[in-house]
Image: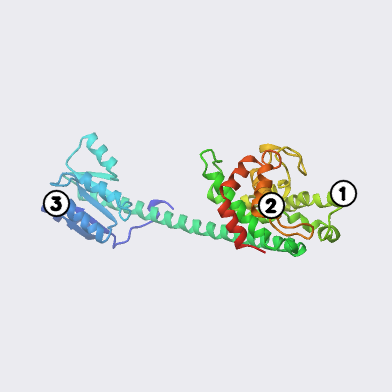
Amino acid sequence: MTPSAVLPTPQATVLVVDDTPANLTLLAQVLKPEYRVQLAVSGAKALEICRRQAPDLIVLDVMMPEMDGYEVCRRIKADPATRRVPVIFLTALTRPEDESAGFDAGGADFIHKPFNPATVLARVRTHLQLKLAEDHLLRHNAQLSDELEARRREVERLRDTTLFVMVGLAEFRDADTGNHIQRTQEYVRTLARWIAAQPDGPADLTEAAIDELAKAAPLHDIGKVAIPDGILLKPGKLSPDEWQVMKTHAEHGADLLQRAVDRLGDDAGLMLTFGRQIARHHHEKWDGSGYPDGLAGEAIPLAARLMAVADVYDALISVRPYKRAMTHEEALAYIRDGAGSHFDPRVVQALLACVDEVQAIAARWAD
């Protein structure tokens, strides 16, 4: 929409500020046929009027006692309630540096004394049209922003609902894990926050990213939906052949999540990206002896390295049909001994630094 396409309302309010009563009277006569006019004989009075109710435009004298027009304009522009009100300076000053000072203070235009009434009307009308056009664009942009935010929330709700269903399916088929999913989710959040808070923490590990990472953690074993019941639910130790089948859950889970990423495209977000990394790589080991890809060191995504520690710690302190639960101290010792071979030493350091929080999570979500 062009400025000329928007007409100022006849009730637009113009505040005129001048310490000379004759100028105020003349400007009021010029403007009153088209606008509601307010008058102020000083900068202080003008600011008081603006605090009560912002006008639509201000015509402001420069040379006034106590507070000149430049200072009045600076204060108007410093106030969020009035910063968008256009200010037209009215002045006998004609030097280029005087106009520069006015523009630096936030002024929109200059009218020189002695003034032509037609010029005053034309300048006021033009800046009110510009202001109305700008208001229209801001409202339109705000509406678009609201619509985009609603779309984002809709996609996030769909994604989280899908996550809930997928995780619920995995839990239904592997009921022995109890509250393992809730615990590991909070372990991952806690470890990630500790690493992010260190001076050399990854710059992209923001609080928003950590939240997405924690949401992704429950997907680590989603691939178990593809494992036959005879293997998944077997109460005893798996045979070598059965173990090879069980290990395929990492690839199955990653493939399943990759399909979701491909379907959602740009709307997939970090959560599904982290989820795929975790599902495929949380059984990798720092020394490269893990599966399915034999990755080593920092080639293993950080999300998966975090999950590896969280997953193993929780498995160690939990009862399973084929093993007893370790004590907290035994589990910590096992993971500490695995730093640099099984686990990322930095993530182990995070676990040891967050012992109290980790124990509290384990107690809160105890089976």
- x, y percent for residue 206: 54, 47
The amino acid at mark 1 is Pro
Residue 312 to residue 285: above or below: below
Residue 237 to residue 202: above or below: below
For image coordinates 67% across by 56% down, the residue present is: 218
The answer to the question of whether label 1 and label 2 lie on touching residues, with beta carbons closer than 8 A, is no
- x, y percent for residue 146: 50, 59
For image coordinates 31% across by 56% down, the residue present is: 81
Give the Cα separation between the discs numbered 3 and 2: 80 Å
For image coordinates 59% across by 47% down, the residue present is: 352
Name the disc covering residue 223, or none: none
Applied colour scheme:
rainbow
Q: Mark 3 or 2 closer to N-term?
A: 3
Q: Is residue 138 left or right of residue 337?
A: left
Name the disc covering residue 311, or none: 2
Q: According to the image, label 3 marks what residue?
A: 23
The amino acid at mark 2 is Asp
Query: How dense is the environment of label 1, judged by Cα within 10 Å: few (below 14), some, or many (20 and up)?
Result: few
**Front one among 141 and 307:** 307
Query: How dense is the environment of label 3, judged by Cα within 10 Å: few (below 14), some, or many (20 and up)?
Result: some
Q: According to the image, label 1 marks what residue?
A: 240
Give the Cα separation between the discs numbered 3 and 1: 99 Å
* Visible residue check, residue 155: no
Q: Nearer the viewer, mark 3 or mark 2?
A: 2
- x, y percent for residue 157: 61, 61
